[in-house]
Image: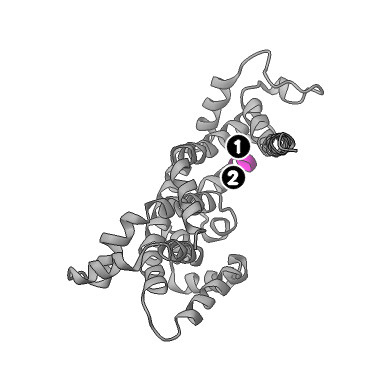
Amino acid sequence: MAHAAPIRRQVWALLRHIVLMSVAAIVLLPFLWMLATSLKPQAEVFLSEIRWWPHRLAAAENYAKAFDKAPLARFLANGVIVTASIFLLQVLVALPAAYALAKLRFWGRQTVFALVLFSILIPPQAIAVPVFLLFHTAGILDTYAALIVPFTISVFGIFLMRQFFMTVPDDLVDAARMDGLGEFAIVWRVMLPTAIPAVTAFGIFSVVAHWNDYFWPLIAVNSTHLFTPPVGVAHFRNAEAGTDYGPLMAAATIIIAPLIIAFLLAQRRFIEGITFTGMK
């Protein structure tokens, strides 16, 4: 029996790896097919047989067409401006709010936290019409402000930062107060350096969500020079690419590549942030 337990653990570990690899293959298959299609000439895209590598490589042609037929560089720049601005504003709001909910003692704190959790349940589509009418009245539709302002407060970010701050010892905060630091100074000079893994994890969630957001930019802006990457690809598909799937898949690959690179660079911090925020 003593030898059977290690064997069972090895079998279960093998089964877990098989399941995880199978799921990973299913998730990655569309992206691999997109990349393969971006390398093919038009004649090989509609072949009845599955061919992962083309007989004639058309990567240079497809990627050049993607940049020639649509302002992809502008779409990418808009994506960077919008996602970076949203993330910075979300951090400016989320860190002090999370610190107050985690470390300050005041009447109604649990009620406020419950309202934060309740707000997570409200989908952005449910309030899209009132926000659209508000921005129309304010005259900021079809501007960068229309893309950024609705997302400056992230209740998920407040929740994530609060859970991380709960793991920070109270003695550290008390020591900072004894040194004469105010509450805002504690947030930015003490809590922020300790929360870098959580901020990185939240940054991945925020950047991916708003880089890929199609719903709100589609109704908030009409000018091509303000299109974010997903809206830009849809515009490229409708106005330029048509059924020329080689350049279309090349454009999609270019737009997805920054997210993959960012995640690979921040992977260790992302895992640390998710791990620590679930400790308490």
Element carrying mark 1: helix
| Placement of 114 over or under 159, stated as above or below | below
x 49%, y 46%: residue? 271
| Drawn side of residue 17 relative to residue 196, left or right | right
Residue 162 coordinates in the image, percent (x, y): 44, 66
Occupied quadrant, residue 253? top right
Q: Most extreme residue toward the left, as rendered? A: 180
Q: Nearer the viewer, residue 131 or 205?
A: 205
Sequence-wise first label, 1 or 2:
2
Residue 62 coordinates in the image, percent (x, y): 58, 25
Q: Nearer the viewer, residue 2 or 245?
A: 2
Majority secondary structure in the magenta region = helix
Is residue 50 magenta-colored? no
Q: Most extreme residue toward the bottom, as rendered? A: 107
Binning the other alpha carbons within 10 Å of mark 1 as few (below 14), some (14 to 19) or many (20 upward) gives some
Q: Nearer the viewer, residue 75 or 24?
A: 24
| Placement of 74 over or under 108, stated as above or below | above
Residue 252 coordinates in the image, percent (x, y): 58, 37
Q: Which residues are magenta?
A: 234-240
Residue 30 coordinates in the image, percent (x, y): 68, 36
Numbered tag placed on residue 240 in the rendering: 1
Determine whether label 1 and label 2 are within 8 Å by CB: yes
Q: What is the C-alpha distance between the residues marked 1 and 2?
A: 8 Å
| Badge count | 2
Q: Nearer the viewer, residue 248 or 255?
A: 255
Is residue 238 magenta-colored? yes
Binning the other alpha carbons within 10 Å of mark 2 as few (below 14), some (14 to 19) or many (20 upward) gives some
Location of mark 2 (residue): 235
x 68%, y 30%: residue? 33
Asked whether residue 225 is in view, the answer is no
Asked whether residue 268 is in view, the answer is yes
Q: How is the image coloured?
A: one colour
